[in-house]
Amino acid sequence: MGYLALLAALCLGAATVARGQLTDNFYNGCCPQAANIVRARVSAAMQAEARMGASLLRLHFHDCFVNGCDGSILLDGSNSEKLAAPNLNSVRGFDVVDAIKADLEKACPGVVSCADVLALAAKYGVLLSGGPDYDVLLGRRDGLVANQSGANSNLPSPFDPITKIIKKFSDVGLNTNDVVILSGGHTIGRARCALFSNRLSNFSATSSVDPTLDSSLASSLQSLCQGGDGNQTAALDVGSPDTFDNHYFQNLLGQKGLLSSDQGLFSSADGANTTKALVQLYSYNSERFRCDFGRSMVKMGNISPLTGSAGQIRTNCHAVN
Ligand code: HEM
Ligand SMILES: *[C@@H]1O[C@H](CO)[C@@H](O)[C@H](O)[C@H]1NC(C)=O
Ligand SMILES: *[C@@H]1O[C@H](CO)[C@@H](O)[C@H](O)[C@H]1NC(C)=O
Ligand SMILES: *[C@@H]1O[C@H](CO)[C@@H](O)[C@H](O)[C@H]1NC(C)=O
Ligand SMILES: CC(=O)N[C@H]1CO[C@H](CO)[C@@H](O)[C@@H]1O
């Protein structure tokens, strides 16, 4: 057996031992440098553009909600998830993923899946933004198909009522607590005017601005978006868009959530009182948020993973082998 084949076999061995479960030491035997390789690339990308940490976090989320965390969002082609409405001109970070994968293929050819690259990149995007250092679980294998219609139906929209968002999370095994905790991912990153300008004018017959949007924030967003093509971006966490903190929840208490789906967790009547109570909790208990966020990320990362001999380890994340 050649050296490289032996390395790959070590990883298969780990999968067998784990009986289809993800583990926190999956690559220790066969590619011990995997996490450091990902961390270095994410760090370099964030030095060039701090927002990239957020973009990589979102990529993992959008991968996991469609056919599980299987790297399907990275596949090109006419049925590509990249072309689905929630992703088109919206998800970003593909170049960083390619650079990570190229480094990994040099160090440990054929060993680290694209799905795990996304999980690791999300972890370091969070950590290097100042977020919690949770133990990411690994050992996912890559899917063989993209699912554009699945991306259109499963991914939450900022225009969905909170009840519908809760349903989309429960469809993938996540509960209402996870909805609130993981929405806290919006402590970093940006959103385009097209996704929130519905709140700025013509909101209802009686008021032109969403009554649950702080009026001075509304004015500044109006000037940002006015006359534009909908592609201008605003911070999801108005005070500290590149720092992972609990200001996202404090903002909601002050009606400074950006998306309707953010503010709805605190203000919406249909949000049920659980989401409101959790927003309050995290607004004053930052440690609790950090801890719960890590736990919910692990849970999200566990959505229908392919393990053992299912799927494959893609050599090129853009296409099946
Ligand atoms: C609860 C339902 C959710 C809705 C409706 C939602 C919606 C959105 C929208 C509309 C954007 C802006 C897209 C654009 O401007 O093109 C966005 C950005 C973002 N979302 Fe969410 N999201 C949700 C949950 C999550 C979750 C669970 C995470 C991760 C844990 C997450 C992480 C992010 C991040 C980090 C960004 C900023 C990305 C960047 O700056 O490139 N979101 N989200
Ligand atoms: C696409 O996603 C939908 C919704 O999750 C699912 O019902 C369907 O089986 C998926 N199709 C494929 C080909 O994976
Ligand atoms: C926003 O930018 C994308 C390219 O990133 C472009 O295709 C789209 O037309 C722009 N939107 C509008 C409304 O012009
Ligand atoms: C939410 O709380 C309010 C009072 O704070 C109560 O009137 C209402 O019935 C509660 N709604 C639900 C769904 O529990
Ligand atoms: C009630 C209200 O503000 N209506 C306005 C909605 O937007 C259109 C233009 O997009 C205006 O013409 C309406 O006056």
Image (tube, rainbow, N blue to C red):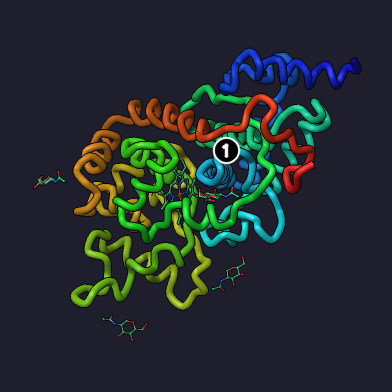
Q: Position of residue 32 (x, y in %)?
A: 71, 18
For the residue pair 255 and 202, the one nearer the viewer reads as: 202
- Ligand 3, seen in the image, is in the quarter at bottom right
Q: Secondary structure at mark 1?
A: loop
**Snapshot quadrant of residue 174:** top left
Residue at left 24%, top 49%? 271
On screen, residue 214 versus residue 184, left or right, reads: left
Instruction: Name above or below for residue 168 compared with residue 310.
Output: below
Q: Residue at x 36, y 65 (%)?
A: 220
Whether residue 254 is visible, yes or no, is yes
Q: Nearer the viewer, residue 284 or 295?
A: 295
Tell me the residue at 71%/57% (across/down).
77
Q: Which residue is mark 1?
A: 69
Residue 80 placement (x, y as % from top left)? 65, 56
Instruction: Judge from the rendering whether residue 13 lies leftward or rightward of residue 173; answer left or right.
Output: right
**Residue 141 occupies which quadrant of the picture?**
top right
| Quadrant location, the N terminus | top right
Q: Quadrant of the C terminus?
A: top right
With respect to residue 230, does 189 lie above or below?
above
Q: Position of residue 56 (x, y in %)?
A: 58, 43
* 182 over 91 or under it: above or below: above
